[in-house]
Amino acid sequence: MVEGKLDGEILPAPPKRALTAYLIFCQRHRERIMREIQPDPSSKFTKDQMQQVTTRLAGLWNNISPKELKEVQGQAAKCKAEYEAQKAQFSPAMLKKIARMRNKPKGHIVVPAQGEKPVRAKTAYLIFCSRHRKDIMRQIHKDPLAKFTRAEMQQVTTTLADMWNKISPSELASCREEAKVELEKYRALKAEYRAPVYGPAKKPKVNVKGETKPKKAPTAYLVFAEEERQRIKLAEPELKHDEISQRLSRTWKAIDENEKRRYQARAEEQKQNLERQSILPSNSLAGEHLPMMSMASYDIDPRAI
């Protein structure tokens, strides 16, 4: 497999991190639990249903038999050995290059973002944790400047989970009400927000005369696809690129003409913006902008030209 290119060099794809014993256990039982919760395999799972699947898997794992635990631990050990063997084929320099390629900055923004970027709403449990976390931390360390070890932070998390399991009905209702307000605020911001459209990160092409070629404006479909793709990724992050593309194509064919005209208007607006940018003076001469002068600036009769 090929990871991508960096400075013209083709980089191979590094091995994927090995599965742990718990993940192997989840692979064994997830499909069965999903069918128990939702018998129809073509039906979509809600967020609450997926949470049920996760909770039941965790419960099964806590009660796993010694025999099955030994089996999944053996499989995990094999996966880790294979991962380490594959990783050993990559030099530290190659791994650094792959990390650089993955962290390459995006291209310049063609269309700026609209509205305030929403931050995912807090759940009732997170709101509960934010109320009590400082008190628990101060019980462990009275000095507010003291650094917490990993074990101490785990102790804070475990204490919060125990308190949540014993939460009073009145505080639970309060946390849920606050979470509901947070969710409504998040949905309102999300409805108004439009993510920025990025251009290519590579350098613009230059023709023989040394002039930068004008950029192509996105079509109505591309404007629609960029907007819809972000929504699909947030809603269903497990979907592959090809599946998202197919869904975008089907959705575009299904939307009505009024909606398509809205995207066509936005595409036309972006086209006009690019055309305005393309007529700006270039800096190809000695790195400086040439002044724009009208015919009246010269001591000649324009009719003589």
Image (cartoon, rainbow, N blue to C red):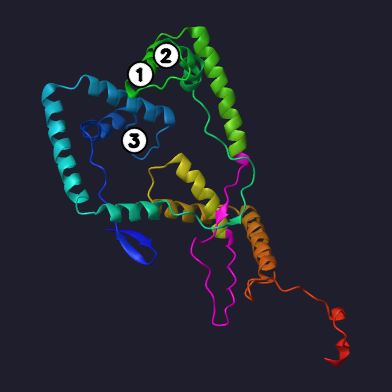
Q: How crowded is mark 1: few (under 14 residues within 10 Å), some or many (20 or more)?
A: some
Horizontal and vertical percent for residue 245?
Answer: 44, 55
Taking the spot 58% from the left edge, 40% from the top edge, the residue there is: 117
Residue 206 falls within the magenta-colored stretch: yes
Q: Mark 3 = which residue? A: 40
Horizontal and vertical percent for residue 248?
Answer: 48, 53
Report the span colored magenta. Answer: 191-220
* Magenta segment main secondary structure: loop
State the quadrant of the C terminus.
bottom right
Q: Which of 49 and 178 is in front in this view?
A: 178
Residue 6 falls within the magenta-colored stretch: no
Q: Nearer the viewer, mark 3 or mark 2?
A: 2
Q: Mark 1 = which residue? A: 152
Q: Which of marks 2 and 1 is in front?
A: 2
Taking the spot 59% from the left edge, 60% from the top edge, the residue there is: 220
Do callouts 2 and 1 mark residues in contact (Cβ within 8 Å)?
Answer: yes
Horizontal and vertical percent for residue 109?
Answer: 58, 55
Where 238 falls versus 91 (above or below)?
A: above
Which label is found at residue 210? none
Which label is found at residue 141? 2
Taking the spot 72% from the left edge, 74% from the top edge, the residue there is: 290
Label 2: element kind: loop
Which amino acid does the dot numbered 2 rest on? His
Horizontal and vertical percent for residue 204?
Answer: 53, 69
Distance between mark 3 and mark 1 Cα atoms:
44 Å
Label 1: element kind: helix
Q: Is residue 31 left or right of residue 4?
A: left
Do callouts 3 and 1 mark residues in contact (Cβ within 8 Å)?
Answer: no
